[in-house]
Image (tube, rainbow, N blue to C red):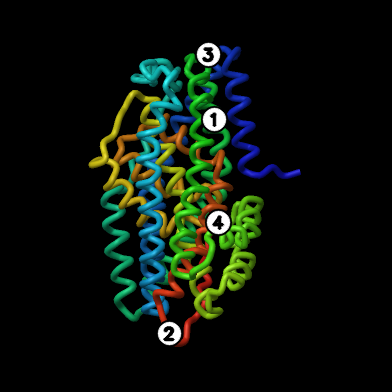
Amino acid sequence: MKFGLLPRIIAAIALGILIGSFSPQWLIQVFATFNGLFGNFLGFAIPLIIIGFIAPGIGSMGKGAGKLLGITTGFAYASTITAGLIAYFSATVLYPILLKNQSFKEFENPEDALLAPFFQVDMPPVMGVMTALLISFTLGLGMAAIKGDTLQNAMNDFRDIIEKLIEKVIIPLLPVHIFGIFANMTQGGQVGAIISVFAKVFVMIIALHLLFLLLQYSAAGSLMKANPLRLMKNMMPAYFTALGTQSSASTIPVTLKQVKKLGAREKVADFSVPLLATIHLSGSTITIVSCAIAVMMLQGQTTSFAEILPFILMLGITMIAAPGVPGGAVMAALGLLESMLGFNETMLALMIALYLAQDSFGTACNVTGDGALTLLSDKASGKEKKLQPQSAVKAG
């Protein structure tokens, strides 16, 4: 029987805590050595991931259906940014209450409690994260502006290579990486507080997902002159399909069927639903921002609105082209977390573990919200000429 990613992550966390509580130091150092190598390779791969997904993603978006493409993309970006802001303000208000008995001082220098690897191998990235982002935007916008397909096809091939790297190498090794991190933190006496944070943050994230869906459908309902709760109820088959499959792509047929039942024009739904499955990740953004602030609090760090706003704005762009594999959103966000919020290897590993523990719920929020945005796009676009359905889709 083949286990999915989520069961493997949960098993890795549980085994890490168990083995880290009694294993000799040399065994923990073996996994610490693996973590060092894997972490360095991840740092090397991050700029490649950014270019491989953002550049062709932006380039292909410029070849859609004009007005409706612009409207739908605008709604998707606005939704994602709003989700990030709600997550930030909710975390700053609720975390001091939810985590009030949590002692953060022991995490100010977490590396001091961790065992060092036996050796390290430097794997410097070919460029910095911001350089990769600028190259991605330059190439993507350029490919969208010109008529030639040569570079677009080359970038699509490069994207396929990077997706294989994530799907066949990085994602399968993540449970081992997370196992090593939790085993090391257990022997350092840190894991109890972290597990407590996991549970409380998880509850807040699910509540924010549902609240944001209500806001999205309230906006759509006001234009449709319909009850938002009724609209949400009609989208529940899509929500639970995404919850089970953990994939926006697998849920598209269900999402399309339910959106058309809500009253969206067929040609608009055929165009917008697959497009939004690719570019609209409001649920994933809520999770990433909420988890990032929780991890920073574990480290004894704080962040101001002036610091988090640029991160959320960039995250909204990065989410448009997040790789199409489970956990792809957080993999695409690692570069921003590292460059804009100063995350180190341990903080990135905690982010990955926190995110993957609820990835299916984030995907369900993304997909269900697509219905509301399709209704908004339908109303805002008015009469539109021939539209070609989009085919590029992703996992959550």
- Are discs 4 and 2 less than 8 Å apart at CB? no
Residue bearing mark 4: 395
- Local SS, label 1: helix
Tell me the kind of residue under disc 1: Ala
Residue matched to label 1: 199
Of the pair 81 and 228, the residue shown nearer to us = 228
Distance of label 3 from label 4 (alpha carbons): 39 Å
Measured as percent of width and height from the top left, residue 249 is found at 58, 62
Position above or below: 196 against 138: above
Seen at 30% across and 78% down, the residue is: 146
**Distance Cα–Cα, label 2 vs label 3:** 68 Å
Name the secondary structure under disc 4.
loop
Mark 1 is surrounded, within 10 Å at the Cα level, by few (under 14), some (14 to 19) or many (20 or more) other residues, namely: few
Question: Which is nearer the N-term, disc 2 or disc 1?
Answer: 1
Is tag 3's residue or tag 1's residue first in the polypeptide sequence? 3
Q: Which residue is mark 3?
A: 25
Check disc 2 and report the residue beneath it. 383
Q: Residues within 10 Å of mark 4 (few under 14, many from 20)?
A: many
**How many angstroms separate mark 3 from mark 1 (CA)?**
28 Å
3 and 1 marks in contact (CB < 8 Å): no
In this view, which residue lies farthest toward the left? 306
Location of residue 126 with respect to 192 vertically, above or below:
below
User: Is label 2 in contact with label 1 (beta carbons under 8 Å)?
Assistant: no
Disc 3 vs disc 4: which is toward the camera? Answer: 4
